[in-house]
Every structure is written in structure tokens, then in C-alpha cells.
Amino acid sequence: MSDLIPSLSELHSLPQVQQPSYDDPDRLRWVVNSLRQLPPLVFAGECDELRDKIALVADRKAFMLQGGDCAETFASVQADNIKAKLRVLLAMSVVMTYGAQLPVVKVGRIAGQYAKPRSKDTETRDGLTLPAYRGDAVNGFDFNDQARRHDPDRLLRVYNASAATLNLVRAFVKGGFADLRQLHAWNASFVKDSRIEERYEQLAGEIERALGFMLACGVNDDTLTTVDFYASHEALLLDYEYAMTRIDSRSQLPYDTSGHMVWIGERTRQPGGAQVELLRRVRNPLGIKLGPTATGEDALSIADRLDPDREPGRITFITRMGAEHVREKLPRIIETVEKSGRKVAWVCDPMHGNTFETHNGYKTREYAAVVEELNGFFDVHDELGSWPGGVHVELTGEDVTECLGGAFQLSEEDLDSRYETACDPRLNRNQSLELAFMISERLSQ
Ligand code: PEP
Ligand code: MN
């Protein structure tokens, strides 16, 4: 490849964490070379378009909604599942657009979110210790030797699963499914007896009347019938992200064509690390997760590394402090960054700082803690005069029981009934919509 991008062996010679340990280097090389021959999943022009939209977020002119599974799985690459996820994201974005009276930039944790950083390398059950599950991109979820082996062939399956997902998403958002006149249909299968659903129906009715009025006046614009929807994931696996990095024929600049936006996780954001080294070369908009141990100086040094030219829309800081820490930790980070003159998009991930394990052994989150962190995020930005630019959530379109509380007051006992996540607990459809109303209220204040 050109000298615009480090070689894979250069990348692997840098400090790196959370990478698979493959036992067959020849097979890995073959997989990487095969991936490099395959067409890009996204196009440079689309990444630029998203970067421009994120620049509007940084400039207080838009709000960002980023959401989807903690970990996608190959088995869930199915039309119904993808459709349900899209439906809840579109419903949330309508609620938020209406409340904020601002455009909502829609980004899925989708079509590539297959690799997970883990706090422990191994997992022990009944005296048996095996490698931890690191996402379908690396190994299998089943607890046996064979499944937990790190298998490079899985990277090709990530490509295929992402391509199939993206293909369906593109068809949905441009092919009539996202037509605003479908607002009621998006909600058709929501639990009918919830007050959230009633609220949604009422809002959909209002929008429908407004739309009818506009159509009667002769307004007939594509923006009423299609939406722009982008794909994002954590750029964790060096081999995969490297293989998908291509030189754009128009601009002659490198893009990571595995997704429109990629982010660097809380565990892999070391400024001298390999992930940062690869991502600083590509032109995509980038997310950077910041947890409660991050300082303003940490945020600035990584931003300087990834975005020396301070390009509008390039950097999104995704803060995930935890409900307990957000009011104390977030202000100094924002102040330091804003004082430097940098304009970034500030997005709140109210999920990852609020995870705990229940007595019956489920990893979960309290809906109330999610709301509490978001309220802290909005309050801190209000006090500092900065713009609370968006939200980053783990959710699913299904009626799972993974997070506690919400309109249906899910209890620890309820978790047993439909706990399906391959990694972190996700908000279900109802909890997601409820959160959209909460955000919409904050934005309209
Ligand atoms: C995630 O987004 O699933 C994740 C692992 O987040 P973080 O890097 O913030 O812990
Ligand atoms: Mn997660």
C-alpha cells in the first residue's frame, strides 16, 4: 500500500492491546489479502457527508443519535432483526427531531460491530477456564475449546455479515420504509399497553397532520420519504481495519471503508498505540470514548494526534462517566477541550459507566441510572454553555429483558425471561423510545 498508511507489520510493532492471538499466521495473511481484494463496504463520499453532518452537531445545529447492539452476532443477521433495530432508531429520531426542532444525525452501531474488548482474557465456569468471548469477529460464544479458539477466517464472515446488513439497511432507508407517512407502521408491533406507546401514537398523529398540510401545499421533498443513515463500529481489530483501509480514487486519501464512522474504545485509546496510529491516517469521522479516569489533557492529546488540522466534524468525544461521576468528572474535560479552541461533537454514552452484576448473575443496567447520567450530561453542558450534541446507546428492536426499570419496571427476576445479548445489556424497544422522549424534553427546554 502507499506510504499514506503504515504496513500491517509496522502497526503490529506498535503497542497494542485487546488483539486476538491467532495460532496460524499463514491463514491470517491469506485472510487479510483476501479482504483487501474485496469491494469497500462504504464510500469515501459518504464518510465525508457524515463528517459534514457531525460538524453541524459540533456547531449546535444538529443532534446525533448513535445506537445498536453492544455486539452484533452472525446469527442475528436476519431481516426481522435488522428491521426492528432500524425501526426503533427511526422512531427515536423522529421523537427527538420533533422535540429539538433540529436535524438528528442517525448512526447505527451496526454492520461491523463484531469485536469486543474484554476486561478479562479468560472465563472460568465450573472449574474450566477458556479464552473469553471477544465477539463473533474473533471467536464463538459457546463455552468450549473449539468455539473459543481465535479464528482468522471469522474476519471474512464479518465482511459478509456487514455487507448483507448494510445492503438491507440501504434498501430500507431509501426504499420507502423510512417514509414519514409510515410513522404509525414503525410502531405497529410495539407493546400496545404502554404509556410510551400512547405518547408515540399521539406524536405520530400530529406529524401526520402536519405532513398532510405540507403535501397539500405542494411540498414534496425526498427528505420526507427517505433518511440518511450511517454505519459505525469500534475499530478494534487491526488486521480487519487495516485490510479495509483503501485509497479513495478521487481524493487519493485513505479511508477505512469498513464503516462510515469508527470509534476508539476506552481501553484502546493510548495516543502511541496501534489503533490511534491507523486511525490518524484515515479520513473518516472518528469517535473517541472517554471514561471517568480520562482527563482533559488526555482528551486533547488524543485529539491533537488524530486531528492536528482541527477539521470540522472529525472528532466526536463519546463520554461514558457513569451516573455517579458525570457531574464531577465531565466539566473539567469539556472546559479543557473548549478552552483549546477545538470544536468537537460531545456525545453521551449513558450505558458503559452504569453496568453491574445482579445477585442472580446477570450483567445489567438500571434504566434510571441511564437517565441520571444523561441528565448530568445535559446539566453540565448547560452550565458550561457547551452543546450536548448527542447520545450513544446500546439497544435492540426486540422486547428483550436485559436492563432493569423503564415503563414496565423490569425487575431482577424478569431478566431471566429474555436475556439474549452476546455482551452488554441493551435497552429494549420500549425503554429506547422512553429514553427518546426524555431526551426530546431536555432538548426542547
Ligand atoms: C462498547 O461501546 O461496547 C464499549 C466496549 O465501550 P467502552 O470502550 O466505552 O468501554
Ligand atoms: Mn458495550
Image (cartoon, rainbow, N blue to C red):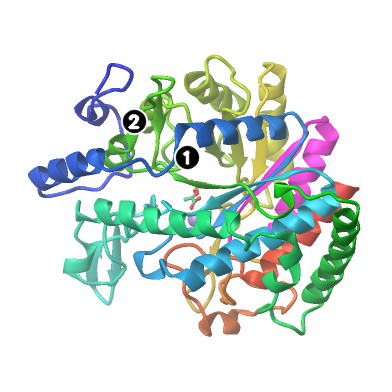
Is 393 included in the stretch rendered in magenta? yes
Q: Residue 354: x percent and y percent?
A: 60, 57
Relative placement, left or right, of 413 versus 1 is right
Q: Which residues are magenta?
A: 370-395
Select label 1 or label 2 by which is in front: 2
Write down the residue under mark 2: 246
Residue depicted at x 73% and y 33%: 331
Residue 399 drawn at (x, y percent)? 59, 77
**Residue shown at the point (32%, 51%) measured from the top left:** 159
Q: Quadrant of the N terminus?
A: top left
User: What is the crowding at mark 2: few (fewer than 14 residues within 10 Å), some, or many (at least 20)?
Assistant: many
Asked whether the viewer can see residue 3, the reply is: yes
- Going 79% across and 73% down the picture, which residue do you hit? 196
> Is 41 situated above or below 331?
below
Q: Is residue 439 in view?
A: no
The amino acid sitting under disc 1 is: Val
| Depicted 177 relative to depicted 67: above or below | below
- Give the numbered dot on residue 262: 1
